[in-house]
Image (cartoon, rainbow, N blue to C red):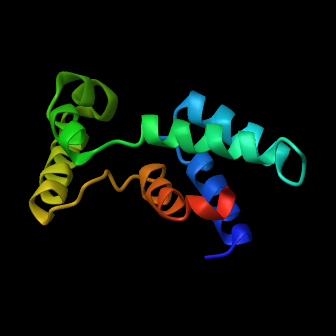
Amino acid sequence: MDKQTLIEKIKAMAAAPSCCAELKAAVKNYLDAVGTAEEKVAAQNLIAEIEDDITTVENLVPFAHSETAVQIFGAEGAKKFAAHADELKASGAKYCDCGACAPAVEILQNKAILL
């Protein structure tokens, strides 16, 4: 993977509705720093934020079965979400596969490119 492809994945991660505000801020700081003397530090901060925010399946499953999930997605949506989380766990997946977490996994796998 090249740096430009990785930057596109970073942008996709930030655009996902499931991306938290702190990660969106780290993405903005990194993108603003690309090509400057601050790029390496911004990349380190971005990677640290991704590592803090990426959701493991072990954390996803209890959330998917929670009352909070029902409040967010509605009863039927939460039921589907919980079934999907259970399927991820059964398949041996380590991380959530939402629009933010899926590219986050790829970014972490290729973080040396950013550093």
Counting from the top left corner in percent of width and height, residue 78 is at 21, 39
Task: Point out the image quarter for the N terminus.
Answer: bottom right
* Residue in the image at 74% along x and 69% along y: 4
| 30 shown above or below 89 | above
Counting from the top left corner in percent of width and height, residue 77 is at 25, 42
Of 26 and 16, the residue lying toward us = 26
* Quadrant of the image occupied by residue 110: bottom right
Residue furthest right as drawn: 36
| 73 shown above or below 43 | above
| 5 shown above or below 74 | below
Q: Name the side, left or right, on which 29 lies relative to 13.
A: right
Of 72 and 39, the residue lying toward us = 39
* Quadrant of the image occupied by residue 54: top left
Counting from the top left corner in percent of width and height, residue 14 is at 61, 46
Task: Point out the image quarter for the C terminus.
Answer: bottom right
* Residue in the image at 66% along x and 54% along y: 11
Of 15 and 78, the residue lying toward us = 15
